[in-house]
């Protein structure tokens, strides 16, 4: 029997604690992780959502669970285990320098088969990405889950969210997830790191060749973003805002793109791109991973300037 009120959107992956160095002997902890952040962003847009993953049962894991609760996520999808927490120690912020702590940690204990009964039939989109796809045995479990969902007709989105643990051994996972995904989100930093090249256009072409049918959201920071589909490509400039920080901007962008695809599937690609760019910008107006609301995104979307791109990658006149 299916559990009541199952979410339409699920983000599967990692939730972790960011330990950020704020002084010589001072550190601040914040709930984070790509999987959790995307779920929080989607919930902020009003879509019934869940983060599917495992956290520790200590104070760090409890804080992550409280963050999911406060965001309105379905916490039946969060599994807790008496294992060490997954931690990202960020000892420099500009440019970011970090390392991960979490050998045999709670995130690795996630069991997809223990999720609420009937959830796969209720879900319209399931999102994957982040360092969860580098950490065995979790990575293989998530890949197998993505394959199963794809066969069942559930839409898949993928944001590799490049980190320094994604070395050449990650190529197999990159190729497998890209081939499954209906939507792929990457930044210029992602492309450079994943394909180990400074040639952005060549890396983007390589990614497109992995799955010509996938829609690609290519975020370019202050330069805006591009949206590539079989039917065309568009470029958008970022709206003028006062930036507090850029934490969570990419997560807000992919969540808003998926929201737009769910809410207005027949809209032109330019409309989906406007929404994604507006959400990323809105997330930058407040410090921390503060996901924007529909009202905030809609207000900025009307100010986003877009152009259609030619097959050569130049903006069409």
Image: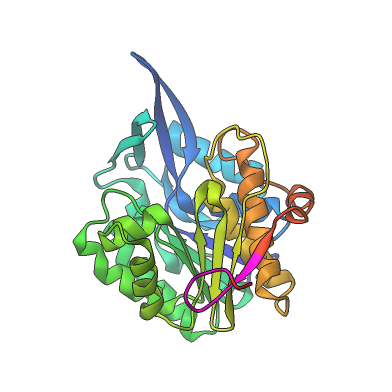
Percent position of residue 265, x then y: 70, 77
Is residue 73 among what the camera can see?
no
Is residue 36 among what the camera can see?
yes
- Asked whether, in this view, residue 163 is left or right of residue 34, the answer is left
- Asked whether, in this view, residue 83 is left or right of residue 182, the answer is left
Quarter of the rendering containing residue 135: bottom left
Quarter of the rendering containing residue 105: top left
Percent position of residue 240, x then y: 68, 43
Q: Which color scheme did the rendering employ for the protein?
A: rainbow
Of the pair 105 and 242, the residue shown nearer to us: 242
Magenta span of residues: 307-315
- Asked whether, in this view, residue 186 is left or right of residue 154, the answer is left
Of the pair 34 and 215, the residue shown nearer to us: 215
Of the pair 69 and 249, the residue shown nearer to us: 249
Residue at 60% x, 73% y: name it: 316
Q: Quadrant of the N terminus?
A: bottom right
Of the pair 158 and 122, the residue shown nearer to us: 158
- Asked whether, in this view, residue 144 is left or right of residue 227, the answer is left
Residue at 67% x, 45% y: name it: 282
Q: Residue 233 in magenta?
A: no
Q: Residue 61, relative to residue 168: is it above or below?
A: above
Residue at 39% x, 31% y: name it: 94
Q: Residue 22, relative to residue 99: is it above or below?
A: above
Percent position of residue 263, x then y: 73, 70
Q: Quadrant of the C terminus?
A: bottom right
Percent position of residue 88, x then y: 35, 38
Q: Residue 312 in magenta?
A: yes
Q: What type of secondary structure mainly makes up the magenta span?
A: loop
């Amino acid at each position: 029997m299916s559990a009541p009120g199952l979410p339409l959107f699920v983000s599967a992956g990692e939730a972790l604690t960011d330990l950020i160095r704020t002084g010589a002997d001072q550190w601040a902890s914040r709930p984070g992780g790509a999987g959790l952040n995307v779920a929080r962003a989607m919930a902020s847009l009003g879509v019934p959502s869940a983060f599917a993953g495992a956290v520790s049962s200590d104070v760090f894991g409890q804080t992550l669970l409280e963050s999911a609760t406060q965001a309105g996520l379905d916490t039946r999808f969060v599994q807790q285990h008496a294992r060490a927490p997954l931690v990202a120690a960020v000892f420099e912020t500009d440019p970011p320098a970090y390392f991960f702590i979490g050998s045999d940690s709670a995130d690795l204990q996630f069991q997809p088969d223990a999720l609420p009964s009937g959830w796969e039939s209720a879900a319209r989109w399931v999102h994957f990405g982040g360092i969860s796809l580098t950490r065995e045995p979790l990575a293989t479990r998530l890949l197998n889950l993505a394959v199963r969902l794809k066969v069942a007709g559930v839409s898949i989105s993928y944001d590799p969210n490049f980190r320094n643990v994604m070395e050449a051994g990650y190529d197999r996972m990159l190729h497998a997830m890209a081939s499954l995904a209906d939507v792929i989100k990457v930044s210029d930093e992602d492309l450079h790191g994943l394909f180990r090249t400074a040639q952005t256009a060549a890396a983007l072409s390589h990614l497109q060749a992995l799955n010509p049918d996938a829609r690609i959201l290519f975020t370019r920071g202050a330069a805006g973003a591009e949206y590539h589909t079989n039917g065309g490509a568009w470029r958008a400039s970022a709206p003028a805002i006062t930036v507090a920080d850029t934490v969570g901007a990419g997560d807000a962008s992919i969540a808003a793109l998926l929201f737009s695809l769910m809410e207005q599937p027949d809209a032109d690609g330019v409309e989906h791109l406007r929404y994604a760019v507006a959400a990323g910008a809105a997330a930058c107006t407040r410090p921390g991973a503060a996901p924007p609301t529909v009202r905030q995104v809609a207000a900025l979307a009307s100010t986003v300037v877009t152009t259609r791109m030619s097959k050569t990658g130049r903006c069409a006149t």
